[in-house]
Image (cartoon, grey):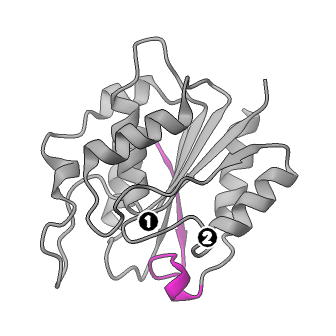
């Protein structure tokens, strides 16, 4: 069965933004079937809409499925994993600038709070995914490094800290992300 990769953008993001087009091409060259869905209402995201959309895109999840999320895309992937049936598993997830609880920075007004109405079920998530890698930046203005430590502690994620990559967005000038490609290739081989 062919390996599939799902690249999930974040809040106010879109499929062609930043490093996603580059990663899509790199993974296709490595033999993956790659999906980069446009998530619904990215200016005003709602958890249920995002999870339902992702569920529809994925169809039946398998251990040959690998997910890469950016920012809000990460908690979307984690919340999606919470919805899987007992015997459903994916191969791995790469979480770029992700967060496991609501954000807290100047100018943020709780726009993403629908994703955090209930506590994250870390144990349930781990039952549906074999491996996690989290990639964080040491100067992200929105998502502090502590979120990477949370993923490391709660999910057993391998933590990769990049220097001076801000929030890993196209607005930050990040249009390639080799660490994400390396992470997908690593977890898809084991």
Compared across the picture, whether 87 is left or right of 183 comes to: left
Residue 84 in picture, x, y percent from top left = 40, 23
Magenta region, residue range = 157-173
Q: Can you identify the residue that label 1 sits on?
A: 97
Residue shown at 43%/65% (left/top)? 97
Rendering quarter of residue 18: bottom right
Compared to residue 85, the image places residue 36 above or below, namely below
Outermost residue, top side: 87
**Quadrant where the C terminus lies?**
top right
Q: Secondary structure at mark 1?
A: loop
Q: Nearer the viewer, residue 172 or 155?
A: 172
Tell me, yes or no, if residue 97 can be seen here.
yes
Q: Can you identify the residue that label 2 sits on?
A: 16
Residue shown at 42%/42% (left/top)? 53
Residue 101 in picture, x, y percent from top left = 22, 54
Q: Nearer the viewer, residue 147 or 48?
A: 48
Residue 7 in picture, x, y percent from top left = 58, 53
Marks counted in the figure total 2
Residue 69 falls inside the magenta stretch: no
Residue 36 in picture, x, y percent from top left = 60, 54
Q: Nearer the viewer, residue 41 or 75?
A: 41
Compared across the picture, whether 73 is left or right of 106 comes to: right
Please rate how many residues cluster around mark 2, counting C-alpha atoms within 10 Å: few if below 14, some from 14 to 19, many from 20. Answer: some
Q: CA distance from mark 1 to mark 2?
A: 18 Å
Residue shown at 40%/12% (left/top)? 86
């Amino acid at each position: 069965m062919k390996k599939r990769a799902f690249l999930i953008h974040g809040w106010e993001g879109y499929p062609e933004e930043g490093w996603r087009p580059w990663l899509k091409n790199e993974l296709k060259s490595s033999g993956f079937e790659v999906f980069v869905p446009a998530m619904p209402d990215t200016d005003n995201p709602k958890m249920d809409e995002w999870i339902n959309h992702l569920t529809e895109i994925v169809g039946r999840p398998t251990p040959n499925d690998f997910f890469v999320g950016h920012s809000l895309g990460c908690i979307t992937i984690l919340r999606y994993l919470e919805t899987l049936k007992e015997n459903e598993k994916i191969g791995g997830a790469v979480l770029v600038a992700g967060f496991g609880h609501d954000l807290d920075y100047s100018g943020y007004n709780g726009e993403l709070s629908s994703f955090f109405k209930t506590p994250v079920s870390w144990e349930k998530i781990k039952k549906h995914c074999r491996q996690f890698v989290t990639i964080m930046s040491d100067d992200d203005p929105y998502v502090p490094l502590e979120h990477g430590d949370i993923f490391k502690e709660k999910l057993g994620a391998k933590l990769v800290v990049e220097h001076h990559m801000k929030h890993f967005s196209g607005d930050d000038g990040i249009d390639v992300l080799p660490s994400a490609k390396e992470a997908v290739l690593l977890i898809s081989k084991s």
